Image (spheres, grey):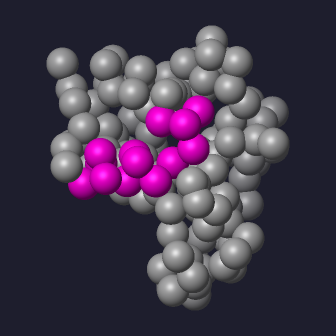
Amino acid sequence: MPRFGRKSLSSLLTLELELQEVLQEAIKHFDFSIVSGHRGEEEQNALYNAVPKRSKAKYPHSAHNSYPSKGVDIVPYPIDWEDRERFTYLAGLIQGIAKMKGIEIKWGGDWDRDTEVKDNDFDDLSHFELIG
């Protein structure tokens, strides 16, 4: 059974409890790593200013900037940033678990939550955030 490594566990502890609950269940079914939970000002703005952009929000306007964090970035393991299909599969699992638990989230592969994954102007396939 997959389990979180040390870095993922450290990031997990920076998240809102609802996100922790969803991810703790998901790791039982699919191997993935948590690459980012809470982010401070310097890290957030570096991602926003990167070329190409790696965040669409400047500090403090990202879900990652609250503490505990309302946003998380996760990636299927083993890591292949180009494997859109595995990101999408993982997103379905995360969204299904959240729905079963009554937790509202959105995914960076479908920002408007219309189930159309090709209409984004900014794909962030690793990103999930709590709504509300």
Quadrant in the picture for the N terminus: top left
Above or below, 109 against 81 in this view is: above
Could you say which is closer to the camera, residue 17 or residue 108? 17
Is 11 or 121 nearer to us in this picture? Answer: 11
| The magenta stretch spans residue 49 | no
Magenta residues (range): 7-20
Residue 116 in view (yes/no): no
Residues 102 and 111: in front is: 102
Asked whether the viewer can see residue 112, the reply is yes
Q: How many marks?
A: 0
Residue 42, placed above or below residue 131: below
| Residue at the spot 68% in from the left edge and 36% down from the top edge | 105
Write the residue at 39% across / 27% down.
24
Could you say which quadrant of the image residue 99 lies in?
top right
Quarter of the picture holding the C terminus:
top right
Please state the horizontal and vertical placement of residue 82, each as a whole percent of the image.
37, 53
In screen coordinates, is 131 left or right of 32? right
- 79 sits left or right of 97 in the view: left
Residue 104: give x, y in percent of width and height.
72, 30
